[in-house]
Structures are given as structure tokens and as C-alpha cells.
Amino acid sequence: MFIPGLKDTLLMENLSWEEINEFVAQGKTTALQYAGAVEQHGPHLPTITDTLLAYALGERVAKKLGNALVAPVIRPGLSEHHIDFPGTVSLSLETFRRIVEESCESLSRHGFSNIVLISSHGGNTDTLKAITPDISKKVARRSNVFFLIEDRHAHEATFERFRKKMNATIGEMGVHSGLTETSMVLAVRPDLVDMKRAREGLVEESFYLPENVLISQMDAFIHGIKSQIDNGILGDPRRATAELGNELLEAISEDQAIQIRKILGAINSNKRAQA
């Protein structure tokens, strides 16, 4: 529920400092800090894809939680494995760490008692997870900082449900610019999608099997995505629809909101036990 008199948005960068202050005073003391990217997403999607989807998910999650605002999405991110494609911008590990840390420090100083770090780009995930304990320690007097680890079972269940609905292969669904990601961008910014340029990417089933995922990922980090597929698409986007994208965004945001509620509940229970 929105507070009367304030803009109909939960994105901090679209609010004034007074509006943010009023929201925090009313109990919106959880900040959702997504980390996105600026990198190639095939010939049909914009390089800002991961960041666009972070904002789309962030607003949905914040509305579901009722006590959260969405911090400006961090970008660029860690995208060295896409650097062979024009338009990709990648940060060093140290620069990325400093940006995340200083963003959390700023949010902590403005009254956000909980800061949730969430990755909307796979290349950021391991680093975010690794740096969270140190950042949490630095702001511990004012805020709780935690990294939202993907609920693997929920993710797989959601993926499988939509795969069956679309009668799609695992390879068609893909993990980068394929059926799922393209559908979500169609749902939020169809004006930035050129489906005439959409074409099949890497769809071999063996590439996506659970036992091969880590190998495929490490190969990409070492040799780059372009060594795996020339057009940069891991999947096949040609049957993507905005309808599917909206359903995916709703399902993913619901999964994230459930996880965050559980973590916040555990934090509050621990505080009561210590009181």
C-alpha cells in the first residue's frame, strides 16, 4: 500500500529526499539493492537488460513486502566474459566491491535497518555472496546486510512449470537472452526489443544439464561467451512473448519476496530473543 500524497513508485531515484524520508518514517526500512550489468544480450535485446529486469523485479518485490524501497540498481557489473561483444562494460572485482560497499554504507546512514543484496546478473553472484559478510560487519551498528541466495528448488520448479507450459526444451528456455529472458524484457520494455533480429543461439541440451552447468559457466568465465556462441545467445528467443514474461516476473518476484520475509522474520525473532 502506498502512502497518500507520495508518488506511485518505490524506486528511490524517482523520489525526492523528503519522500524517501517520509517512507522510512512510515516503516519502509528495508532497502533492496540489486546489482545488474551493462552487457551484450544477443542482437535483439538491449545491453541494459539485466538492469531493466532488476528494476522490474525490485518494484514487484517491494510492493509484495510492503516495507521496502528499491535502491538505484548498481551497474555496470562483472561482465568480463561478455567483453568480446561491443557495448559490454565491465568493472574490476575491486571497483565492484567498493561500489557495493559504499552504496550499503549510504543506505545504512539514511535509516534502512535492513539492506538486501540481490544479483540480477549471474556474473555478480559469487562476488556478492563473498563480500557480504565484510560489508555487513562494517555497518552492523546501524543495519543488517544480507545476500539473497537463490532458492534453487523454487527456481527449478518455476523454470520447469513454464518450460512445460511453453512445451519448450531446456536449451530453448536458455540462461542468457533465450526464451525466458527475452519474454521478460518484452513485458517491461518492448520498445527496446527487436524480434526481427532474434535467432537461435546455443540450444544443445547437454550444455544446460545440472551436472554440466558449473563446467559450462567456468568455460565462459575463462574463454568468454563468444567462444561458446557467436551471437551471444544461450537459448532460443524466437517464441518469446510479453505474456510469458509478465508471468515469469510475477513468479520470480514472489519467490524473492518469500525468501526475504523468511530472513527478516528470523532477524526479528533473534532480536526478540536477545532482548
Image (spheres, rainbow, N blue to C red):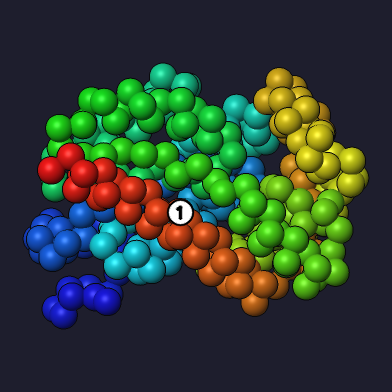
Please provide percent x and percent y for residue 152.
62, 47
Look at 55% across and 46% down and name the residue there.
150
Please provide percent x and percent y for residue 217.
72, 31
Q: Is residue 4 left or right of residue 262?
A: left
Nearer to us in this view, 260 or 14:
260
Please provide percent x and percent y for residue 165.
78, 73
Residue 209: tell me if it is visible. yes
Q: Disc 1 designates what residue? A: 259
The N terminus appears in which quarter of the rendering? bottom left
Q: Is residue 94 left or right of residue 138?
A: right
The C terminus appears in which quarter of the rendering? top left
Q: Is residue 127 left or right of residue 88?
A: left
The kind of residue tagged 1 is Gln
Residue 242: tell me if it is visible. no
Q: Is residue 80 above or below residue 52?
A: above
Q: Is residue 69 left or right of residue 197?
A: left
Nearer to us in this view, 151 or 9:
151
Q: Secondary structure at mark 1?
A: helix
Please provide percent x and percent y for residue 183.
66, 66
Look at 15% across and 32% down and name the residue there.
141
Look at 28% across and 59% down and name the residue there.
68
Check disc 1: other Cα within 10 Å, few if <14, some if 14-19, many if 20+. some
